[in-house]
Image (cartoon, grey):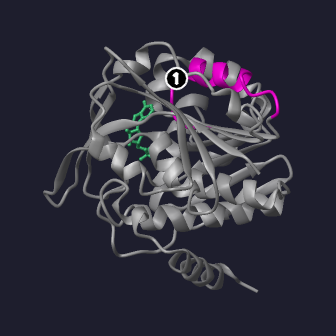
């Protein structure tokens, strides 16, 4: 089944509490999402970068052959989105150091004609008005899920509320759910969001896992317990990548199917954080994904 993602491709600078940092690495919500999703199947990428986008980052994207990057626009005279962040010692909280929107503040990319029959859509983090516009360009969508974050909740809450009326699902961090709804309790926040339109909300709690608030029930899943945490950037986007790609692959949109998809997202995310940028995902083997999934199923089975 055809999966498409729209979102950012960016150049990131990341500082971690152990004194390590990386400057100018490949990042962005759609870059992380598509790399993760491609471990399960084909994924169509729609995004825009500026003319400063380096060849080395194109080469990194090319390490994921199941990502169809023909919807990646390189805009002459524009600058690529750049983002910098610093993680606190608990590795779960981060401070944004800068967000240079660059090309993101301009016209959004267009969806190529050949992608218009896509059935599974992930609107990775971007301005909610842009997310809405892209959703309108895809008339055959069977499942649409959006992500959002603090910047958009602060600067464009009305656009976000409009978007929520039209999507099937929302994936967001616990702090952002609180910020948007005013409810500290994730279940209450999730139910509030369901009233605005979506059928389900996945509230991510970093190392504490994720909560599913669905019209048919509630569910909670821990994170995969891991000792190797180098850089948590992209954990949320790659969780979404594994989640959506599994749904697109199986076509099982039932409540249980969504719970299983969350487990797949959890496993991909646990690998992402073992290195900076997409390094770990680029050399991940399907057997490694499967064996960690099997281990996780055993761990979470109370039967
Ligand atoms: P995550 O750690 O999953 O929240 O994703 C981090 C990625 O999102 C980084 O690679 C950033 O380039 C990208 N990003 C950061 N801020 C934004 C934003 N406001 N909109 C879209 N993408 C963003």
**Whether residue 227 is situated above or below residue 168 in the rendered picture:** below
**What is the number of callouts on the image?**
1
Region rendered in magenta: 123-140
Instruction: Tell me the element at label 1.
Output: loop
Q: Which residue is drawn at 30% across and 21% down?
A: 79
Q: Which of 8 and 14 is in front in this view?
A: 8
Residue 69 image position (x, y, % from top left): 51, 41
Image quadrant where one finds the C terminus: bottom right
Q: Which of 156 and 22 is in front in this view?
A: 22
Q: Is residue 14 visible?
A: yes
Q: Quadrant of ligand 1?
A: top left
Residue 97, located in which quarter of the rendered image? top left
Residue identified by numbered label 1:
127
Residue 82 image position (x, y, % from top left): 30, 31
Residue 71 image position (x, y, % from top left): 55, 33
**Whether residue 65 is situated above or below residue 10 in the rendered picture:** below
Classify residue 282 as left or right of residue 128: left
Asked if the residue at label 1 sits under 8 Å from ligand 1, the reply is: yes
Instruction: Specify whether residue 52 is painted magenta.
Output: no
Classify residue 165 as left or right of residue 10: right
Label 1, residues with CA under 10 Å away: few <14, some 14-19, many ≥20 = many
Q: Can residue 185 be seen in this view?
A: no
Residue 25 image position (x, y, % from top left): 27, 46
Q: Which residue is drawn at 60% across and 77% down?
A: 293
Instruction: Specify whether residue 136 is painted magenta.
Output: yes
Q: Which of 194 and 11 is in front in this view?
A: 11
Q: Which residue is drawn at 83% across and 54% down?
A: 253
**Whether residue 72 is situated above or below residue 21 in the rendered picture:** above
Q: Residue at x 46, y 74 (%)?
A: 225
**Whether residue 151 is situated above or below residue 265 in the rendered picture:** above
């Amino acid at each position: 089944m055809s999966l498409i993602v729209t979102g950012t491709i960016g150049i990131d600078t990341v500082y971690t509490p152990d004194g390590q940092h990386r400057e100018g690495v490949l990042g962005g919500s759609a870059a992380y999402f598509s790399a993760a999703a491609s471990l399960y199947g084909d994924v169509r990428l729609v995004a825009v970068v500026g003319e400063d986008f380096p060849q080395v980052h194109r080469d990194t994207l090319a390490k994921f052959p199941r990502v169809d990057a023909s919807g990646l626009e390189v805009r002459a005279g524009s600058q690529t989105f750049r983002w910098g962040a610093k993680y606190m010692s608990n590795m779960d909280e981060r401070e944004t150091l800068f967000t240079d929107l660059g090309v993101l503040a301009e016209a959004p990319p267009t969806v190529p004609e050949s992608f218009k029959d896509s059935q599974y859509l992930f609107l990775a983090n971007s301005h909610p008005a842009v997310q809405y516009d892209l959703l309108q360009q895809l008339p055959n969508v069977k499942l649409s899920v959006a992500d959002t974050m603090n910047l958009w909740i602060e600067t464009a809450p009305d656009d976000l509320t409009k978007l929520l009326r039209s999507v099937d699902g929302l994936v967001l961090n616990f702090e952002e759910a609180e910020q948007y709804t005013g409810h500290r309790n994730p279940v209450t926040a999730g139910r509030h969001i369901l009233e605005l339109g979506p059928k389900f909300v996945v509230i991510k709690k970093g190392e504490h896992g994720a909560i599913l608030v669905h019209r048919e029930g509630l569910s909670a899943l821990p994170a995969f317990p891991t000792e190797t945490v180098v850089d948590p950037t992209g954990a949320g986007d790659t969780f979404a990548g594994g989640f959506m790609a599994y749904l697109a692959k199986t076509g099982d949109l039932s409540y249980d199917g969504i719970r299983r998809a969350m487990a797949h997202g959890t496993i991909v995310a646990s690998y992402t954080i073992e290195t900076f940028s997409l390094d770990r995902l680029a050399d991940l083997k399907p057997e490694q994904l499967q064996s960690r999934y099997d281990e996780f199923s055993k761990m979470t089975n109370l039967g």
